[in-house]
Image (spheres, grey):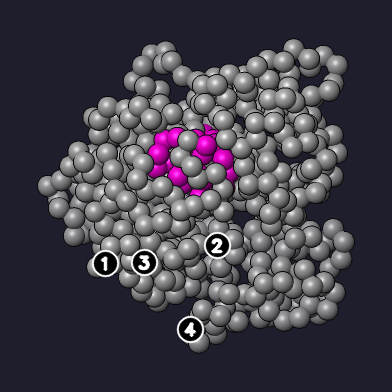
Amino acid sequence: MFIFTDDHAVQAIGAYGSKINATPNIDRIAESGCVFTRSFCGNSICGPSRATVLTGKHSHKNGFLSNSSGPFDGSQTTFPKLLRAAGYQTALVGKWHLKSQPTGFDYWEILQGQGDYYNPVFLSEGAEAGESDSTQAMGYCTDLITDKAVAWLNQRDADRPFLLMCQHKAPHRTWAPPLRYLDRYEEQDIPEPATLFDDYQGRSRSLAENKMSIDKDFSYPYDLKIREPVPFANAYEQRFRDNEYARMTPEQRAAWEAAFGPRNEAFLASPPQGRALVRWKYQRYIKNYLRCIDAVDDGVGRLLDYLEEQGLSENTIVVYGSDQGFYLGEHGWFDKRWMFEESLKMPLLMRWPGVIPEGAEQDALVQNIDYGPTFLDAAGLPPDPAMQGESMRRLFTEEAPRWRDAVYYHYYEGGGEHNVPRHEGVRTARYKLIYFYDRGEYNLFDLKSDPNELRSLHDEPGSEAVLAEMKSQLQRLRRQYEVTAGSPERRNAE
């Protein structure tokens, strides 16, 4: 069972030591399995990460480089296809976001496009080839996806093994929480990250040009749930409407207004200024983000309870992950894309009875290219030669397993709504090299002495040997993964 969310940061998971929330049901997976402390994506954005999970190949190999790519080439080999061919029942419920119809599944029911939190539209395979039936479901998206996952489990063939991919929209922007949690956290202040007011000095100048700042790039109606005009807001801050509010039933709107109406009135009557306003925006953002996660945690609990009630816990692998990490105010940001730790890290918790001991912690450098090979290995199937990852089983079954000492990253999109430049890089257990190749700029970080990545060492005396070694590692990984797409001009910049 593969439970996958969108933009769930490790710093908002109890098993990873969260200081801002509790996730008791997600933590159940860690307690009976393993937390992967160095789990990373290869391209921190939704569609490309999902394509990598399915294919076991980096973006340049599976062809889905950015969210503007597409549609996903469903004719290529994926791990669900191989499991299905081996006799597994395969099902996908929830977010797909690859601009194509899913392939390799006996059953699928997916959100339309990005999906909505309230009363979302689901697509299912239509009667005619190349078409899909669409149905609006009334209720809250996270709960509905869990309902549909349980419904499929109840009708599956109990005599055959299964793969269920339960993929949530939450906690993706716009962070519209369920009605039952609108008041949760309201009477407390969520701790701020140490780098909320990062000045972006000492690193590439591109950091300061970002468009994902809590201070400057939130929309009052869209992100902060203030539908009333804000007198001091500019047109940029008033852009976008609250599309979730527009989708609600009268009863849902009444509950929403009862929660946010008085809070918004208080804000507009005496709005904070300067850093106090940034702190207010952070609190409004992070509380809604965490409320969305609480609904996910409820759903995880329901699925784990189902496995226990049906006697399936001891022979079912359960994986919890997310397509990438997310900035929860670190560096003043709220999105992903950059190679900095908060979005590079993917949560990965795995319960594998008989293979992974309870309460394990694994610090090997794993990546989303490893998911497919691991699932195939678990089913007793040989590795697919096109997949670039490795099975993670050996990390638990071999005394001194052969494993990688560095991971490769490449963000291809560039510019766009959040103005994050194209870049690639390499991360080892201690160091990280980021290459902003359109500018010919390197940033080098020592994650041991500078875990918040506030000062690049790339041009500091005494760092020459480390810089040379990390450049060599980058070129080695480019050769290993046959990276040829995106920016061949970088070779001339070496």
Number of the label disc, if any, that sits on residue 328: none
Q: Is residue 348 visible?
A: no
Residue topped by disc 2? 291
Compared to residue 469, the image places residue 193 above or below, namely below
Q: Is residue 25 above or below residue 272?
A: above
The mark tally for this picture is: 4
For this rendering, which residue is in front, 403 or 70? 70
Q: In the shown orientation, is residue 245 left or right of residue 124?
A: right
* Image marks 2 and 4: residues in contact by CB distance under 8 Å: no
Q: Label 1 is placed on what type of residue?
A: Glu
Disc 1 and disc 3 in contact, CB within 8 angstroms: no
Earlier in the chain: of badge 4 and badge 1, it is 1
Q: CA distance from mark 4 to mark 3?
A: 21 Å
Q: Which residue occupies 62% across, 27% down?
A: 426
Q: Which mark is residue 128?
A: 1
Per the image, label 3 sits on a secondary structure element best described as strand
Q: Residues within 10 Å of mark 4 (few under 14, many from 20)?
A: few
